[in-house]
């Protein structure tokens, strides 16, 4: 009788255990963010129907599923102003992180428009669709031969409209001789 109760209890426990879902083991390799491609000394061109409008140079470029990370990189944007003159914007940074149309420039960022505007900062966010650049960190730079310094910047590259907080602007005045 005791054997029959023991076998019946063992059978019931086995049936119950069969229908309890087992926990899947965590796959540590799946959680890791593995690169899809790695390029050394790469150049990436972006073409539209009219012309070549964007070039990215980098010492090391890593492509992940959701972003591109580029080290020691520069982004060159080519466009035309309302008078149909060529405009070349150059952005240099120690690191560029690109997610879709959003670029994040980090560490020692230098922005140059042709030969008349320069900005130096440690962070710059750029949207390639709207062509607007912003940052939240202090910056300094030049506009023609004039010095500019501020806490944050908003730069519309379409209209070339610039805003800044706590801006300090020094204008060089040249005296005309008689």
Image (tube, helix red, strand yellow):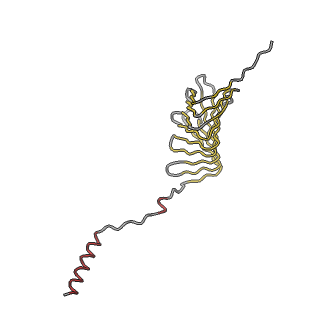
Above or below for 151 versus 30 = above
**In the current view of this chain or complex, which residue is farthest to the front?**
166
Question: Where in the figure is residue 103, as x and y percent of width and height?
Answer: 55, 41
Residue at 80% across, 14% down: 177
Question: Where in the figure is residue 60, as x and y percent of width and height?
Answer: 63, 50
**In the current view of this chain or complex, which residue is farthest to the right?**
178
Above or below for 146 versus 135 = above
* Left or right, 41 with reference to 134: right
Question: Where in the figure is residue 71, as x and y percent of width and height?
Answer: 62, 48
Question: Where in the figure is residue 90, as x and y percent of width and height?
Answer: 64, 36
| Count of numbered tags | 0
Residue at 37% across, 66% down: 23
Q: Which of 69 and 44 is in front in this view?
A: 69
Residue at 43% across, 64% down: 26
**In the current view of this chain or complex, which residue is farthest to the top?**
178
**Which quarter of the figure has residue 22?**
bottom left
Is the C terminus in the top left, top right, bottom left or bottom right quadrant? top right
Is the N terminus in the top left, top right, bottom left or bottom right quadrant? bottom left
* Left or right, 21 with reference to 1: right
Residue at 72% across, 20% down: 173
Above or below for 103 versus 6 = above
């Amino acid at each position: 009788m005791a054997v029959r109760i023991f076998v019946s209890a063992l059978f019931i426990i086995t049936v119950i255990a069969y229908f309890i879902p087992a926990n899947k083991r965590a796959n540590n390799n799946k959680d890791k963010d593995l690169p899809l491609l790695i390029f050394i000394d790469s150049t990436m061109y972006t073409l539209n129907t009219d012309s070549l409008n964007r070039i990215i140079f980098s010492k090391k470029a890593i492509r992940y599923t959701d972003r591109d990370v580029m080290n020691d990189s520069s982004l060159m944007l080519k466009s035309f102003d309302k008078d149909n003159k060529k405009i070349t914007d150059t952005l240099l940074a120690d690191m560029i992180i690109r997610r879709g149309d959003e670029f994040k420039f980090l560490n020692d960022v230098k922005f140059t428009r042709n030969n008349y505007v320069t900005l130096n900062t440690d962070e710059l966010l750029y949207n390639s669709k709207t062509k607007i650049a912003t940052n939240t960190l202090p910056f300094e730079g030049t506009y023609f031969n004039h010095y500019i310094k501020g806490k944050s910047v908003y730069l519309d590259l379409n209209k070339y409209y610039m805003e800044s907080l706590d801006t300090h602007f020094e204008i060089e005045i040249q005296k005309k001789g008689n």
